[in-house]
């Protein structure tokens, strides 16, 4: 993407879920939270997204308190409101409720001077799915190694 700078990526989400569709959302933050994010003090590992009363919130996203902040520091795991069009939120709400899917924040990045969240509409993986994906990756790695050896 042009004009974007990746802050953090939720690698565990790709291991635990099949990502069916992705969405971009803005996020409502305070000044000390932005400063902490610029210093790399953010973690998406246990984060998830919930839709309440027509509004969408990210829960359990950890943003470390800004080390030079004072009374303006906020709770590190507070619920943060995401900014999306009402139509998109209602569509996501319908898919989550009807199909039993989950909304997971996949990455956090700067787009210009704004912080954006990439949301994934996900379905959970079973243990055998995780094993199949790992076996496929190992097979691809072995093929690449063999081709590299053959081309020497």
Image (tube, rainbow, N blue to C red):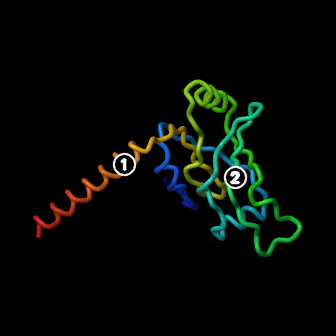
| Residue depicted at 77% across the width and 53% down the height | 78
Question: Dot 2: few (<14), some (14–19), or many (≥20) neighbours within 10 Å?
Answer: some
- Residue 46: x and y, percent? 62, 53
Question: In front here: 56 or 46?
Answer: 46
Q: Are marks 1 and 2 in contact (CB under 8 Å)?
A: no
Q: Which residue lies furthest to the bottom in this view?
A: 68
Question: In front here: 144 or 137?
Answer: 137
| Residue depicted at 70% across the width and 61% down the height | 63
Question: Dot 1: few (<14), some (14–19), or many (≥20) neighbours within 10 Å?
Answer: few
- The residue identified by callout 1 is 131
- Residue 122: x and y, percent? 52, 39
Give the Cα distance between marks 1 and 2: 28 Å
Determine whether 22 is above or below 146 in the image.
Answer: above
- Residue 48: x and y, percent? 64, 46
| Residue depicted at 79% across the width and 58% down the height | 30
Disc 1 vs disc 2: which is toward the camera? 1
The disc at residue 60 is 2
Q: Quadrant of residue 25?
A: top right
* Number of numbered discs overlaid on the protein picture: 2
Callout 2 secondary element: loop
Q: Which part of the image, by quadrant, shows the C terminus?
A: bottom left
């Amino acid at each position: 993407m042009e004009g974007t700078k990746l802050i953090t990526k939720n690698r565990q989400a790709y291991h635990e879920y099949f990502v069916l569709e992705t969405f971009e959302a803005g996020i409502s933050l305070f000044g000390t939270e932005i400063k902490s994010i610029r210093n790399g003090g953010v973690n998406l590992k246990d984060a998830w997204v919930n839709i309440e009363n027509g509004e969408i919130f990210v829960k359990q996203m950890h943003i470390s308190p800004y080390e030079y902040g004072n009374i303006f520091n906020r709770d590190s795991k507070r619920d943060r409101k995401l900014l999306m069009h009402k139509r998109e939120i209602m569509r996501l709400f319908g898919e989550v409720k009807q199909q039993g899917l989950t909304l997971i924040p996949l990455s956090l990045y700067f787009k210009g001077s704004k912080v954006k969240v990439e949301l994934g509409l996900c379905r959970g993986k079973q243990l055998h799915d995780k094993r199949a994906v790992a076996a496929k990756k190992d097979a691809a790695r072995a093929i690449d190694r063999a081709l590299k050896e053959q081309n020497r």
